[in-house]
Image (cartoon, rainbow, N blue to C red):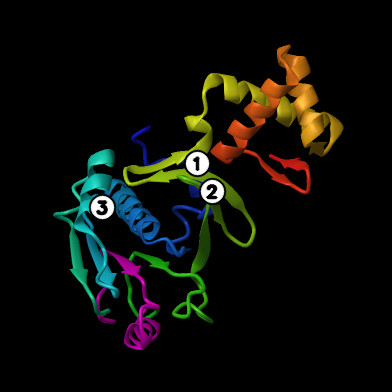
């Protein structure tokens, strides 16, 4: 994978770096931990000398996740992250605050809701379950909903935008960067056709791919399936969504 913390589509989605209060919502535990670690690495690499505090309400955050992500992006997370299970409202200064699973129980929710907006940290990054009871009614925190499409392919969605990324224990990649040159070519063909002809059905896409690449339609269908598995297209009511 590309060892870069700069993924333009992701930064646009979360309005980075202007937006500094973000909540990532997912019911997959390892996904939340990887995303938190990536955000820690991103902040540490961009800011440099900053204290990172992790409030782990569920006490489930694995140090090896920090190690893996730190290794991928060449950032020493282990020695820069302080872990607690209780949020102190008096913290402030050059601090990045990372909060994990605040909906874990009533005590966690109470501590989080009473104090999260009182802190004066430079960044506040939350990871929690869906639906997040802890975040209910709180304003000023961008919600990003993370949903699995296939094995390591996930959609990241706000109320206005949606992107698809590849996520693993080693980090995050723009899904387009994971495609072979052949699949990139087919994707461009479909994008051009959808602009020229409008919405495409599965049959339309098969015919276009078969014609442009001079291949059998059975092969064109297999290529469509590969693109869908990569998450760059999806099929809804027999229509191709790119």
The residue to which callout 3 is attached is 65
Which quarter of the figure is the N terminus placed in? top left
Q: Residue at x 36, y 78 (%)?
A: 104
The answer to whether residue 128 is left or right of residue 214 is: left
Can the viewer see residue 147 in this picture? Answer: yes
Q: Are marks 2 and 3 in contact (CB under 8 Å)?
A: no
Where does the magenta region start and end?
A: 88-116
Determine the CA span between mark 1 and mark 3: 24 Å
Coordinates of residue 50 in the picture (x, y in percent): 23, 57
Is residue 93 or residue 16 the one in the foreground?
Answer: 16
Q: Which mark is residue 12?
A: 2
Few, some or many residues within 10 Å of mark 3 (<14, 14–19, 20+): many
Determine whether the residue tagged by mark 2 lies in a helix, strand or loop.
Answer: helix
Few, some or many residues within 10 Å of mark 1 (<14, 14–19, 20+): few
Determine whether the residue tagged by mark 1 lies in a helix, strand or loop.
Answer: helix
Nearest to viewer (mark 1 / mark 3): 3
The residue to which callout 1 is attached is 8
Determine whether the residue tagged by mark 3 lies in a helix, strand or loop.
Answer: helix
Determine the CA span between mark 2 and mark 3: 25 Å
The answer to whether residue 118 is left or right of residue 84 is: right
Coordinates of residue 115 in the picture (x, y in percent): 34, 83
């Amino acid at each position: 994978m590309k060892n870069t913390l700069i993924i333009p589509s992701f930064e646009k989605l979360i309005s980075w770096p202007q937006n500094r209060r973000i909540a990532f919502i997912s019911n997959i535990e390892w996904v939340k931990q990887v995303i938190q670690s990536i955000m820690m690495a991103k902040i540490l690499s961009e800011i440099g000398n900053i204290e990172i505090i992790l409030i782990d309400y569920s006490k489930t955050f694995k140090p090896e996740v920090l190690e893996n992500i730190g290794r991928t992006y060449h950032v020493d997370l282990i020695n820069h992250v302080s872990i607690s299970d209780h949020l102190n409202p008096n913290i402030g200064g050059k601090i990045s605050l990372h909060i994990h699973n605040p909906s874990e129980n009533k005590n966690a929710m109470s501590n989080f809701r009473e104090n999260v907006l009182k802190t004066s940290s430079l960044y506040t990054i939350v990871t929690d379950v869906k639906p997040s009871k802890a975040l209910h009614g709180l304003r000023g925190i961008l919600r990003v909903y993370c949903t699995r499409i296939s094995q390591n392919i996930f959609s990241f969605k706000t109320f206005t935008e949606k992107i698809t990324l590849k996520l693993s224990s080693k980090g995050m990649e723009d899904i387009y960067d994971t495609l072979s040159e052949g699949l990139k070519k087919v994707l461009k063909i479909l994008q051009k056709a959808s602009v020229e002809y409008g919405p495409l059905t599965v049959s339309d896409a098969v015919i276009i791919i078969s014609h442009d690449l001079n291949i059998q339609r059975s092969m064109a269908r297999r290529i469509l399936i590969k693109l869908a598995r990569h998450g760059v297209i999806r099929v809804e009511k027999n229509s191709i969504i790119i």
